[in-house]
Amino acid sequence: MEKGNQIYEGKAKKVYATQDPELLIVSYKDDATAFNGQKRGAIEGKGSINNRLSNALMRYLENNGIPTHFVEELNDRDTLVKRVRIVPLEVVTRNIAAGSFAKNYGIAEGLVFSEPTIEFSYKNDALGDPLLNEYHILALHLASREEIDEIKRLAFRINELLKAFWLTCGVTLVDFKLEFGRLSDGTVILADEISPDTCRLWDSATGKKLDKDRFRWDLGGVEDAYKEIMSRVSQKLEVGR
Ligand code: UDP
């Protein structure tokens, strides 16, 4: 499958059409942004790591009954995916307080929840991705009641599967952001990516942050953290080279 016209460029990925109207090629960049695009930079090797890592995790989820957009890894940076219409929601599932949750509710990072939480934001950079409750989602016609229920069911199931997987890598899954899309028949499937850009991952033994927080907060060792995550995953799952 060859790249056709570029149809979209986001902060971390480009998207190309293909000869097949139902398939797209996603190309991962090394560019990194944080705080709604206010902080910009690059993380050397990130595009390749996130591409291969996200694909390995999507294959793992598919093998466990989760429908995803993943079709085929084409090379280091490029992956063939199913074309979806993205549901304009950022779906964040949390196991431990961190980031905006700790800040908004005035608690220390690290509080372990007895039950995972889920929250939705409106995927809209101009508005700064504001939080939404389910009534807001319905009022704005962003998703139907059935779609919201399906997205919650999938997100909690994905959380259980990913938490268990990361544990085998000595990594604690703190929180993560998912995006879902609709196939042409309306089926909701997992899209976008799962990577250290979109998850908080802490070393289970030391608590060391192994994710994009190292970039957000200038903690140093950003590239090494992404490499460390990649190396731990590749000992457990088949990862493309
Ligand atoms: N996240 C993301 N994209 C965003 C916002 C958040 O991938 O635009 C991820 C982030 O990496 C973290 C989780 O979602 O794993 C929860 O992020 P949070 O709401 O705490 O926001 P942040 O602290 O990143 O502003």
Image (spheres, grey):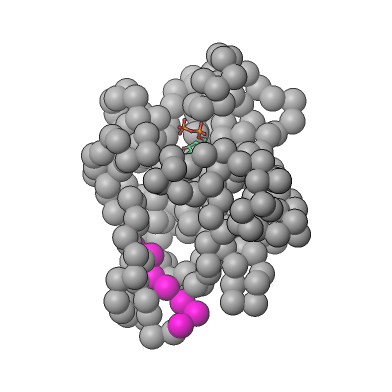
Q: Quadrant of the N terminus?
A: bottom left
Q: Position of residue 142 (x, y in %)?
A: 61, 56
- Tell me, yes or no, if residue 82 can be seen here: yes
- In the displayed structure, 67 sits above or below 157; it is below
Q: Is-magenta flag for residue 23?
A: yes
- Tell me, yes or no, if residue 228 can be seen here: no
The boundaries of the magenta stretch are 21-27
Q: Residue at x 37, y 76 (%)?
A: 17
Q: Residue at x 31, y 60 (%)?
A: 9
Q: Is-magenta flag for residue 2?
A: no
Overall secondary structure of the magenta section = strand
Q: Quadrant of the C terminus?
A: bottom left
- Seen from the viewer's position, the closer of residues 16 and 70 is 16
- In the displayed structure, 111 sits above or below 56; it is above
Q: Residue at x 45, y 49 (%)?
A: 124
**70 relative position to 10: left or right:** right
Q: How many marks?
A: 0
Q: Position of residue 196 (x, y in %)?
A: 43, 41
**43 relative position to 153: left or right:** left
Q: Position of residue 185 (x, y in %)?
A: 65, 77
Q: Residue at x 69, y 25 (%)?
A: 113
**30 relative position to 99: left or right:** left
Q: Position of residue 208 (x, y in %)?
A: 44, 23
**173 relative position to 223: left or right:** right
